[in-house]
Amino acid sequence: MKKEGRTQAVNNSDLEVAGIWTDRRVAITGGTSGLGQALVTALIARGARVAFVARNRERVESVVRDVSQAHGVVGDVSSKTEIYPIAIQLLGALGGVDVLINNASSLGPVPLVPLADTNCEDLELALQTNLLGPFRLTKALLGSLGASARERRCPVVLNISSDAAIKAYPNWGAYSASKAALHHLSRIWGQELSSQGIRVLSLDPGDMDTPLHALAVPDADRSGLKSPETAAQEMITAVERVLLAGSANDKDERQEVI
Amino acid sequence: MIAASLPNQRPSDARLLVIDAKGQMKHLARLNFPDLLRAGDVVIANDAATIPASLFGTHCRTGAPIEARLAARESLHADANTCFSAVIFGSGDYHIRTEYRPSPPELRSGDTLRFGSLHATVVRLLDHPRLVLLRFEGSSERIWQGLARHGRPIQYAHVPTPLAIWDTWTPIAGPLAAFEPPSASFIVNWSFLNAINRRGVHFGTLTHAAGISSTGDPELDARLPFDEPYRIPESTVRAIQDAGARGGRVIAIGTTVVRALEDAASIGDGLRPGEGLARLKIGPGTRLHIVDAIVSGTHEHGSSHYELLRAFVDDGTLERMDRELGQERYRAHEFGDSVFVEKLKIQAIKEKAGEQDIRPR
């Protein structure tokens, strides 16, 4: 069933959106594992210009070795003082930004624990990474996204969400609260920025077979999990729909899917 | 005037001295700037993001501490970041007024300079012992990384606390192009964009590599502004043409916007999109082809910014402006108050009549 869905998406993509990513400037956070890395690989393959951010220098260099056209930036989006140095390096690599994908996530306390056992610092870290990081980086790049809109490049901000942003799962408190806040932030930002031609999406990629999921649920049956490549394809298809819709004023095309 | 010493881009009590097309003056709360705009007008701002262009390091031949302030490069392309012209200072930092900063050691072609992970070579002196052409080593990516990690915003003694990069980026900052903030654009936040949109006022941007405003050396200061690259997008040219067709005004946010638009319009037949190098020094003899009004900071008599205002209004009006700014204790410098100066009607009429020199009698 999942495989059929994926095949369908690829076919649609091939038919409708040939060339739509060519020279599009894409910035991705959390680009060295799971969904982020799959997005880097898939978007480079589609002709996009991609710069990604991740904390670990060795892993950044390793991804750049694998995907040589991608630009790697070493930085931590959870740190306030790192945001502008990150933004400068993204803009230096790409010259501007048309698509920003806020993908980097922190689970909070690992192993997962009830809120009553969650340290304040763990909640803070989840909020710094999952809420404040995307807020700050989007804000730092908003001028570039606005310029992209004026040049009719149809800029998009994609914030990676989770069903935990909506549903209350015990033990997922720090992560859920941060993702719920990010989701609501996305919806408000989407409304505020639509008049400026900037679209904001908040999408749930589903349960994926990623290092983050393995940390959260070490004994999960991995065969039941979506591959990051499949999820990346779904995210790309969702962004493509917005790019194809084109017009900044077409509110029906704004998507806030969970 | 008094110096604005806090790095607050939009203080709630910021003021705007308005000089209208008849030369009449009034004081406004700057928040109410959109009230001056009419449907059909177009507002053009500089969307340059500010490179942290102050680099502290070492002059390797002597071991002396130096500060390099990057001042210009030839192109706005993101990967054209190998060569910069730079003003070199000796020891100390922004706490010392630039005119009192110790001199750097004698600089020669081939000297190497180290700034954290960034290594640079002095290619040559640019007709002044402290103005040099620098070439950084490494890939474009490594140079941006070095600037992002090691560079600090260029700063002056009137702001005593260290500036963060976010203090210097306007709300619309995009391409990495400016060496000091295009500070007139501090007023252009997203609420402002919504407010003017509601009034039927259009908005466009250009990117201009706003350079350094002061070097502490009278001879170098007299050469400012250096030639500065700019880029005008097609959408901005269209917005300006639409405003012209509707009888709307072109309102420039900042001197850099005037420089870029008027430079572009002075070449060939009319305003065209694309890149250029602003060489034009705008002053009392300049005929303004595009811009009808400017929003600017408050500037000292004799500075290049002040000279530019002389293209809009006569000297008598500017003298009255100076008196008002002084009496009302307007705040100067990049985080200070602002002026809105509309081209005097009489000058607009003279220009239409084809007179080149619009200096008042």
Image (spheres, rainbow, N blue to C red):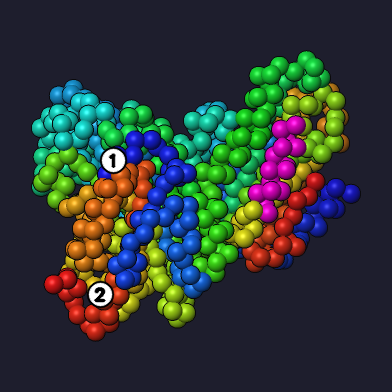
Q: Position of residue B273 (x, y in %)?
A: 39, 69
Name the subunit of mark 2: B
Residue A128 located left or right of residue B347: right
Q: Which residue is mark 2?
A: B347
Foreground: B319 or A1?
B319
**Is residue A58 shown above or below B217?**
above
Q: Position of residue A96 (x, y in %)?
A: 48, 52
- Report if residue A222 is visible in the image: yes
**Farthest residue toward the front?**
B327
Q: Position of residue B110 (x, y in %)?
A: 16, 37
| Quadrant assignment, res B3 | top left
> The C terminus of chain B appears in which quarter of the rendering?
bottom left
Residue A178 located left or right of residue A56: right
Q: Residue at x 34, y 35 (%)?
A: B5
Disc 1 on helix, strand or loop? Answer: strand
Q: Position of residue A202 (x, y in %)?
A: 72, 47
Q: Residue at x 65, y 61 (%)?
A: A243
Dominant secondary-structure state across the stretch colored magenta: helix
- Report if residue A40 is visible in the image: no
**Farthest residue toward the right?**
A1
| Quadrant assignment, res B336 | top left
Q: Which residue is mark 1?
A: B2
Q: Identify the disc placed on residue A33.
A: none
Question: Which residues are the magenta region?
Answer: A177-191
Q: Amino acid at mark 2?
A: Gln
Q: Residue at x 36, y 52 (%)?
A: B338
Whether labels 1 and 2 belong to a single chain: the reply is yes
